Image: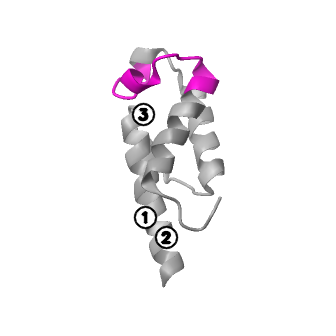
Amino acid sequence: MSNHIKNNDAHLYIIEIIKKLFEFTDVESAMHKNFEDLDIDSLGFLELIGEVEEYFDLELSDAEVDLIKTGDDLVRAINRAIHLKNSAIAQ
């Protein structure tokens, strides 16, 4: 992955990984729903977080992970981490 990751990359990748891991066909509408409502258990959730962190070469804090309830929340968390990483690289 390049040093400067675009915010839209997070959204697109998270949609693809949710499709792959959980076999959803309509991920766009699922992005707004709580993972619990989508029958994604804690093990599946942690697998999702791990896949995303590995792909973007980022690590989310436990506190930040605790706040992630939907796919949209995950995109926002990754975008914040990308912004911080890109800011650090630019300095």
Image disc number at residue 63: none
Residue 76 x %, y %: 38, 47
Image disc number at residue 86: 2
Q: Which residue in the structure is indicated by mark 3? A: 71
The residues colored magenta run 19-36
Of residues 60 and 86, the one drawn nearer to the viewer in this rendering: 86
Near mark 2 (Cα within 10 A), the count class, few <14, some 14-19 or many ≥20, is some
Q: Which residue in the structure is indicated by mark 1? A: 83
Which badge, 2 or 3, is on the more N-terminal residue? 3
Q: Is residue 84 above or below residue 79?
A: below
In magenta stretch: residue 23: yes
In magenta stretch: residue 34: yes
What residue is at 37 percent from the left and 22 percent from the top?
29
Q: Do residues under tags 2 and 1 come within 8 Å of each other at their CB atoms?
A: yes
Left or right: residue 88 versus residue 57 is left
What residue is at 56 percent from the left and 55 percent from the top?
59
Residue 26 picture quarter = top left
